[in-house]
Image (tube, rainbow, N blue to C red):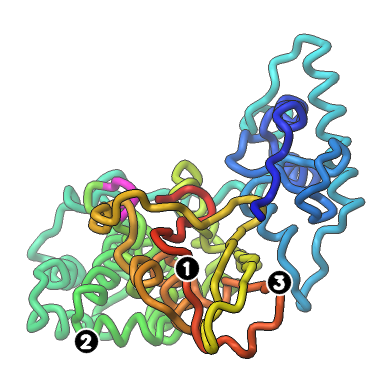
Amino acid sequence: MTRKKIPKKNETKVLTLSRRRCCICYGLSNDFEIKNGQIAHLDQNSENFKLENLSWLCFVHHDQYDSRTSQSKNFTINEVKQYREELYDFINKAVKSGMQLPKGDDKLYNNKSNKHKKISDDFTFSESSMADIDFRLSDDDEVSIIIKKLKSHDWYSQNPAISKLEEIDHSEISKDQAFVLGRNIYQSACGGANNSKNFMNFLRNSLAIFPIKLSRFVLCGMFFEAYFDSKGEFRKYSIKGKYINKLFEIQTAKPYKECITFIKNHLESYRNYIVATPNDPPIIITLNLKIMKFKSKECYIKELFCGTNNLLKEIKDTRTKRAKDIPHQIWPLTFDSFTKATFLSILSDSWHIPKDQIKLEFNRDYSSCSYFVLPKKTIIVCPYGCY
């Protein structure tokens, strides 16, 4: 049985009361920006549609609220309700007084508690480095020569270039050069250059060859390369995910927290195309599976929910298999049976997040299921409509 949708009357009420502002962002940080998000059931009962049980939360805080962790205390229902009431009270007073609601950058909210939304000018890079097709490289300095070799797409040039990184004078590398260097180390690793692959496989150790400030700029370039192309445009359906798990491994490293803020800021406008951004603490995507015994060793996945979103979508024409907006990795789940391990690996590859950030919850014991199958002519879509 599919889950019931929130009644339109209640949905509209929550959206207008909140003005699509996340109450947790507001309560913790006076962050008043309009956010992409979802209506959360605060008691986590998806059939409780009472207004007192509903609240608009941004994607990050919705995921954190729904997740369970033994390492830190989750948001409590009473805590979130208090933030919600404070938010509604402020909006109500603002509307009654005729005051224009601030969007997040107004002086009213330009206080110390908002610092987490900002990064220092050190993490502002030139337009030509963000669109590195325009970045000027000379034949006179060592780092420019290394970047040129990494851009060559020739392994015989790329591998020696990586080896040179420890030998050059790091004090001569500019912030923008370090950023573009990071971009091209990442792209050459995705292209198969062995030394670049080793650099990414041992990322924390590899970054340690640079002074800490410089290593942050290099890492920012790597994050940017994964999500944005050489023209500085968001990759949308072609995110470079081959080593993205290695980037996510560093998301909780305190020396690189400004790098996480940097990439999150740049990805905010594209949240509907991304399952989870790098974050500290890591964002956990919880999937609820309703399974039925199908054959002796197979279980039939009847429903698959993330929050209130049903991720099983009917395919009317299987010739859409090659559609560019559906990751090629996801299709084997439609046509073949699969193990739990395969399921997690495919979701990880297609959603570009680590496997350990996907949590599966089943409605029944699945220990007797060696394999799972989807309903015929269905495909799994990503939680937030990315494809």
Residue pointed to by mark 2: 194
Residue type at mark 1: give it: Leu
Question: Mark 1 or mark 2, which is nearer the start of the sequence?
Answer: 2
Residue 320 appears left or right of 301: left
Viewer-nearest of discs 2 and 1 = 1
Residue 265 appears left or right of 17: left
Residue pointed to by mark 3: 363
Q: Which residues are magenta?
A: 232-237
Question: Mark 3 or mark 1, which is nearer the start of the sequence?
Answer: 3
Residue type at mark 3: give it: Asn
Task: Please name the residue shown 32% across and 83% down the image.
Answer: 199
224 drawn magenta? no
The image quarter containing residue 170 is bottom left
Q: Which mark is residue 170?
A: none
Q: Element under label 1?
A: loop
Is the C-beta separation of discs 1 and 3 under 8 Å?
no
Viewer-nearest residue: 8 or 319: 319
Q: Is residue 92 above or below residue 14?
A: above
Q: Element under label 2?
A: helix
The answer, for residue 31, to whether it is visible in the render is yes
How crowded pointer 3 is (Cα within 10 Å; few <14, some 14-19, many 20+) is rated as few
Residue type at mark 2: give it: Asn
The residue sitting at the top extreme is 98
Question: Mark 3 or mark 2, which is nearer the start of the sequence?
Answer: 2
Task: Please name the residue shown 28% across and 47% down the image.
Answer: 232
Residue pointed to by mark 1: 374
Task: Please name the residue shown 88% across and 44% down the image.
Answer: 81
Q: Element under label 3?
A: loop
Q: CA distance from mark 2 to mark 3?
A: 44 Å
Is the C-beta separation of discs 2 and 1 under 8 Å?
no
